Amino acid sequence: MSTVLNTIAVEPAPAQPLREFWGYFSANRGALAGLLIVIGVLLVAVFAPLLAPHAPDLTNNTAFLKPPFWQSGGSITYPLGTDAIGRDILSRLIHGARLSLVIGLAVVVLSVIVGTILGLTAGYFRGIYEIGVMRLMDIILTLPSLLLAIVIVAILGPGLMNAMLAVAIVVLPHYVRITRAAVIAETSKDYVTAARMNGAGHLRLMFNEVLPNCTAPLIVQASLGISTAILDAAALGFLGLGAQPPSPEWGTMLADAREFVLRAWWVVTFPGLAILITVLAFNLLGDGLRDAFDPKLKR
């Protein structure tokens, strides 16, 4: 008997979910790079007052449009140069990282909460309510996102809070559609039927049984949605409808520098690079999360 037991191959223990997730995520080099950049931006945003060499609104009447330190006429006091009224661009970029991340996170949190509730109830109850919700989302999706955001801000008035609300409305349909599709797929499974037969009510079925199994696509969409929110908020700021001067928001910095593009390249280039790198990092992070969560992509 002992000989038979010794000949039985010992199956390896199943991988832990977190370790398995990290294995698939780390296989995507772009996702790792995006994660490192996102962590760096977060650290810069948190420690902005300590990292910034100057206050973001501090002006210097003797340093108008001063070039970066490696160019002739530049100074290490202003490493990336100054803008048209003598404010340090590096300090404004550092404080702008905090503002841009707050915008992205606030927009995503608001749209995820509202979109999850609408998608969850639409996918669970179906019927006329589902048709009404989804047709409303289809109407929002038929309109160009930036144009719709501009219209909403024009109605509510320019300002950071109104811009955040407008962007949240624009990205809302994505979360509603994702949640509804996941809920419809989950409600037909055996564990939901068993919970229903055990006497579980609607609220318990929706929030305790169905919703926890729909979080993976929402997490992926939320990571991608932060980049969309930052980009749309920067576009509204550039048009003068988002954060208002002297706020160090990246889009507002671009708007302030429009007339100096040809003779002071640094006032436009560095805010544009900050937007590009941050948006790209969140997109790479979202791609990595999608690869790690989606079982169809696991090999």
Image (tube, rainbow, N blue to C red):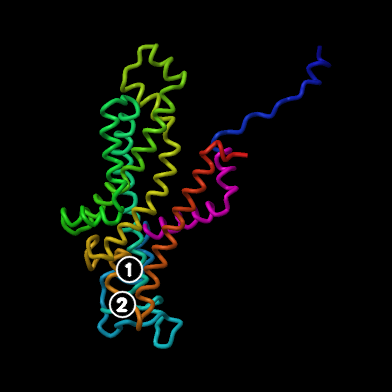
Residue at 26% across, 78% down: 85
Which of 171/72 is in front?
A: 171
Q: Which residues are magenta?
A: 19-45
- Image coords of residue 285 (percent x, y): 48, 50
Residue beneath disc 1: 92
Residue type at mark 1 is Arg
Q: Main secondary structure of the magenta part?
A: helix
Which of 112/137 is in front?
A: 137
Query: Within 10 Å of the Cα at label 1, are there few (<14), some (14-19), or many (20+) other Cα atoms?
Result: many
Which of 241/22 is in front?
A: 241
Dot in front, 2 or 1: 2
Residue at 37% across, 71% down: 90
Q: Is residue 36 magenta?
A: yes
Taking the image as shown, residue 25 lies to the left or right of residue 203, namely: right
**CB atoms of marks 2 and 1 within 8 Å:** yes
- Image coords of residue 186 (percent x, y): 43, 26
Indicate the secondary structure of the residue bearing disc 2.
loop
Is 278 above or below relative to 264? above
